[in-house]
Amino acid sequence: SAGQRRDVLRFRRAAIGCLVAAVVLVPVYRARNERWVQLAELSERVLRTVAADAARQASGHIVLVDAPDERFNLSAAFGNLFPEALALRVGSGWTGEIVTSPDDASRPASLTYRLSAGTIEHYAGDRPD
């Protein structure tokens, strides 16, 4: 308000310039945030799929086989927080891990999924279900 009282015209021009800049930069902000939106959508799809299947059992271990060559992969979506996400979404009786190969799992899995072309699918041995 002090700036407006000092020079009304200058204040008006500065305010209009700031508003125009904010509107012009919307596409830049959207492009910058697209990566995070894609990762959030991937993690939500994974948790929704896992929760639906895990509801049939009281507890177990879930293994996610990642596709490290894909731009949006499980490691980028969850980092080290997949076990915590499982506990919140599915229940404390469930544990889980993200691996690059089913052979890398620390223990036998009750449910195994793999990431393929941005979608999560059941994984059984060398062939998907």
Image: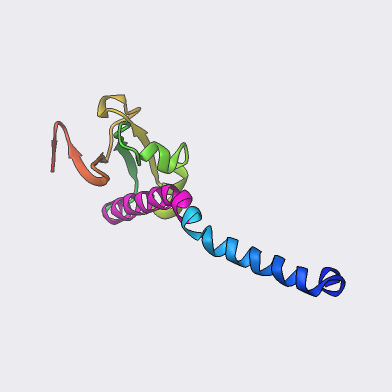
Magenta region, mostly helix, strand or loop? helix
The residue shown at (26%, 25%) is 103
Residue 74 seen anywhere in this rendered image of the structure: yes
Q: Position of residue 67 (x, y in %)?
A: 29, 34
Q: Position of residue 96 (x, y in %)?
A: 37, 39
Q: Which residues are magenta?
A: 30-55
Query: Compared to 67, does 10 lie above or below?
Result: below
In the image, 28 versus 49, the foreground residue is 28
Is 42 covered by the magenta stretch?
yes
Quadrant in which the C terminus is drawn: top left
Q: Position of residue 2 (x, y in %)?
A: 86, 70
The residue shown at (28%, 56%) is 52
Relative to 98, is 126 on the left or the right? left
In the image, 48 versus 119, the foreground residue is 119
In the image, 22 versus 100, the foreground residue is 22
Query: Compared to 73, does 88 lie above or below?
Result: below
Relative to 91, is 129 on the left or the right? left
Q: Position of residue 34 (x, y in %)?
A: 42, 51
